Image: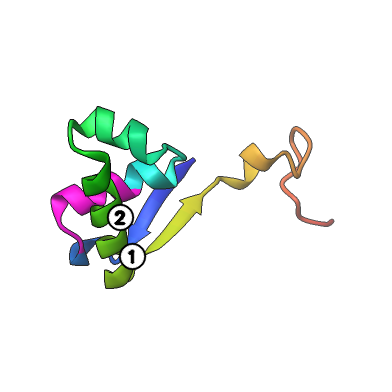
Amino acid sequence: MQIEIRGAEKLSFRERQVVVLKEMGYTNEQVAKKLKINVSSVATLYNRAKSKGYQVVIVIPGDHLGLFGPGDDGEEE
């Protein structure tokens, strides 16, 4: 699985760090501890990033979804 942030060029380095961790499911407290910043700074950075507009796209290869059996490429004969 890969996470792609579209519009990341609009975000500062610190905003990108916060966005990635938040989108991975970390709480504000966990992000603050990991980045060694205040919890209020995490909230501010995340809100500022959201206001700049970005999209998070999760890329999951089809074979990881278990949609096809072994050796089945999904094409009909």
Magenta stretch mostly in which secondary structure? helix
**Residue 35 is covered by the magenta coloring:** no
**Which residue was labeled with disc 1?**
50
Mark 1 and 2 residues: CB-CB less than 8 Å, in contact?
A: yes
Give the image location of residue 13, x and y in percent: 15, 50
Q: Gap between marks 1 and 2, in whole Å? A: 6 Å
**Quarter assignment of residue 47:** bottom left
Q: Residue at x 33, y 65 (%)?
A: 50
Q: Residue at x 82, y 57 (%)?
A: 76
Give the image location of residue 61, x and y in percent: 56, 45
Is residue 49 toward the left or the right of residue 1 in the image? left
**Which residue was labeled with disc 2?**
46
Give the image location of residue 25, x and y in percent: 47, 40
Is residue 60 toward the left or the right of residue 76 in the image? left
Q: Residue furthest right?
A: 77
Which residues make up the magenta segment? 11-19
Quadrant where the C terminus sits is bottom right
Look at the numbered disc 2 and give the secondary structure of its residue. helix
